[in-house]
Image (tube, rainbow, N blue to C red):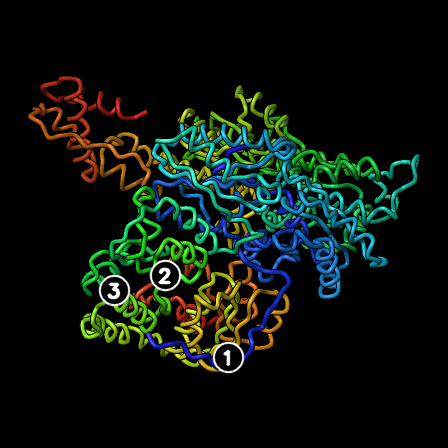
Amino acid sequence: MELTLWTYEGPPHVGAMRIAASMEGVHYVLHAPQGDTYADLLFTMIERRDRRPPVTYTTFQARDLGGDTAELVKRSITDAVERFAPEALLVGESCTAELIQDQPGALAAGMGFGDLPIVNLELPAYSKKENWGAAETLYQLVRSLLKPQLPPPGTPKPDPSRWRAEGRRPRVNLLGPSLLGFRCRDDVREITQLLASYGIDVAVVAPLGARPADLRRIPSADANVNLYPEVAATLCSWLERQFGMPCTATVPIGIGATVAFLRELHGLLGLELPAELVAAADGVCAAERRSRLPWYSRSVDSTYLTGKRVFIFGDATHAMAAARIASRELGFQVVGLGSYSRELAREVRAAAQELGLEALISDDYLAVEAAIAEAAPELVLGTQMERHSAKRLGIPCAVISTPLHVQDVPARTAPQMGWEGANVIFDSWVHPLMMGLEEHLIGMFRHDFEFVDGHRSHLGDGAPTQTSAQPAELAWSRDGEAELAKIPFFVRGKVRRNTEAFARERGLAVIDSEALYDAKAHFSR
Amino acid sequence: MATTVAPELPPTLRESGQREVFCGLTSIVWLHRRMPDAFFLVVGSRTCAHLIQSAAGVMIFAEPRFGTAILGERDLAGLADANDELDRLVAQLLERRPEIRTLFLVGSCPSEVIKLDLAKAAERLNRQHGGQVRVLNYSGSGIETTFTQGEDGALQALIPLMPRSEELQLLIVGTLADAVEDRLVALFQKLGIERVASLPPRRSTELPSVGPGTQLLLAQPFLSGTARALINRGAELIRAPYPFGVEGSQAWMAAAAAACGIAPQAVAEVLDPLVERGRRALAPLRETLAGQRLFLLPDSQLEIPLARFLSRECGMELVEVGTPYLDRQLMAEELALLPPGTQISEGQHVDNQLARVHAARPDLVVCGLGLANPLEAEGMATKWSIELVFSPIHGIDQAADLAELFARPLRRRAALSFA
């Protein structure tokens, strides 16, 4: 038993719903009590879907338990098949139904639906979570649809560069994008364009937008792109084992990762590496100019980003990508890295170790908040929950990962992956921070109550407030007054007050120009 | 209150099939706000935790006053372990949250199915933590309760702790927004009713008394079990429509006043000006709502009183009034006020019901969050039923606000134009 006030991931059957709802022509019969129908709102409210997820719930009640709940399951399955005429049927149970052991999947298999592919989902609700459930469902569904195509043992692996001999462009599958995933809709569009610009076609995108018939075409591609390992890793490794399909290991979030991804994919497909993907003598690779991030990061305005302390928490894929971008591409100092994705804990730990950190693997948001407070970062990159924690702590935050909030499904196209994804990341991480010259001034005068408050209003109520200096009997020397007069009028009053506060703190009776510069040195960093 | 006439209603449509309703756990969302010194610990699964946070959209609390003790595989293997685990977890919780005065152990679908006896657990925990906190239990499980019925369970858990008193008093039962409660209590006192108490109270430890002198006034229509238990403790149930709209609220207050022996003349003096003002406030909203066709899907159990208000005072046409279950006794006064021919449906077969919605193409559908956007996408305006349990909608002064909740989606549709 575990005390949970809030959870990053739902139960595994919600992961299965994500797969079903992402696809066309799939229906999911879920043996579950009425309360479990809440999950529909995740799709219709958060994702603003214009239709109900394709899920039939048996909604059994206490009074059914004495009778024949198995009969109820069968009736629900029959109704669903008749009403929705699915091309593939998922059958499973939620936590409560798991306890009454009606085995709906086995029941469905024996109901004589002929050719209708039926996938019996057994998702242990008391030990697994949402992402695992999504990964398992996608894998089970593809496996059951591809069964007739399984190559006999001993079949040689297909050559990933066979496209050349077949006189066509190379093609890959994009695996893992799903509803309730972070910016999947826009990532698919971005990566499809990116690959097209290198002459690579996309064969199947799954599960998002796919039909069962599309899943059957998966082996026709030359390689798989594991776009979201949380959802697609199980499937990708099965396809590699059973169909000999090679698979990318790099997730193209950030400039370095996008370039590494393209190089990796060119290698897998036996494609000649274009010159723009080859690093020049100075280490710069021409392709990075397709994004504005590298130049924006090098431009003088970004100097103030140097060494910004940043704390990162999210799903494993986005947290690890963020750590790489933050440390290498924006010049931040990563002071904390963690994830709630236990399945990928090893990878996150390794990424943290590279940065000299110990990864925080936890699904306790209060432990994450405590770690943030302890690390005292200047920016938090996290989930919507870390956004709230950061607000309480008065720290700016950008959201980089699920669990999804309605704000994470923007109207505009805002990918995380590829060149445009890097642009989006630059904007969305840097805007919460104070900008350039503005920050320089605030840094100098940050102990001034009004100044700080006025400029940090985006931090909300949680922003730290500081008391302003009390007026006091301090004398200004003539050169002190003269120096003060050189300061632009709109901040002069504030400089005066800060300098006086500094002087009082130091026990100075007279403020001369030296004291003013000392104060400036003290308040700046 | 006049005796109830048999309403000229067609036979109720009874349906069974897939229900699209929250479970009783959802009521924790408003109960914990009402009693800030109480903590609601659901003993259940990750699904329970996910349901509450999704339904409530809770990401705003540092530490919410509700949580879930998530059962693991080990707890399922042996109930002895589960009890030990629960004790450990409660001790841990109380250590971290010493301000908790009442701890509700809330049963869920899985805890009911494995027959984890939370009443025994509460007894045991009371022995362990007696003095610091009171431990109570009730079930919010979806196999036994829908949505608002969770409050019925929580209040029933409090009733045995209510002190006995034969003093004459008016007891308002059902969670009200604090501001609305203040207003209603002030009005009752103005009417000459001196002792007015509320269940649930604002502080979980300050429970009202109950006994033969108690006049029981239900503010919410979903408290069947609570009403029965209070009647068993000697309270007398006031029969009235529910305090939604000008008419319902007036009748509700008048019935309470009559039960407390206040002369009708005195009641009229206080309420008539309010009624007049309330009707004036409603008038512009009636313009938006009159003639619009309304379909209520079963969800909050408020559907019948709302249908009565929206048809009689706002001029809406009722296509179908769904209710998760029909308590004919507690709804008698409401049913009597429904326009003849109103089709009531009890229970749900969501696909069949949506087919009727599609066929009827109403102007406004009252439904749960899961169905709202799909119906909007088909061109029908919707009102989420969950907002009705979070908003201050009770009483004469709130009648216009209540109507506004239904008028806004229609006005919005009319206000939008593209290209």
Q: Where B74 falls versus B273 (above or below)?
A: above
Number of numbered discs: 3
For residue A306, what is the image quadrant? Answer: top left
Q: Where B369 falls versus B49 (above or below)?
A: below
What amino acid does circle 2 point to? Answer: Leu
| Front label number (2 vs 3) | 3
Circle 3 packing at 10 Å, graded few (<14), some (14-19), many (20+), is many
Q: Chain of mark 1?
A: B
In the depicted view, which residue is nearer to us: B159 or A208? Answer: B159
| Element class at badge 3 | loop
**Which mark sits nearer the N-terminus, 2 or 3?**
2
Residue B149 picture location, percent across and down: 48, 55
The residue labelled by disc 2 is: B218
What amino acid does circle 1 point to? Answer: Leu
Q: Chain of mark 3?
A: B
| Element class at badge 1 | loop
Would residue A255 be visible to someone looking at this image?
Answer: no
Q: Could you say which disc has been placed on residue B9 in the image?
A: 1
Measured in 3D between alpha carbons, the distance from the residue under mark 3 to the one under mark 1, in whole angstroms, is: 32 Å
* Residues marked 3 and 1, same chain: yes
| Front label number (3 vs 1) | 3
Q: Chain of mark 2?
A: B
**Which mark sits nearer the N-terminus, 3 or 1?**
1
Q: Quadrant of the N terminus of chain B?
A: bottom left
The residue labelled by disc 3 is: B260
**Residue at image coords 46%, 79%:** B7
Would residue A218 be visible to someone looking at this image?
Answer: yes
**Residue at image coords 43%, 57%:** B228
Q: Could you say which disc has been placed on residue B41 in the image?
A: none
Residue B241 picture location, percent across and down: 37, 69
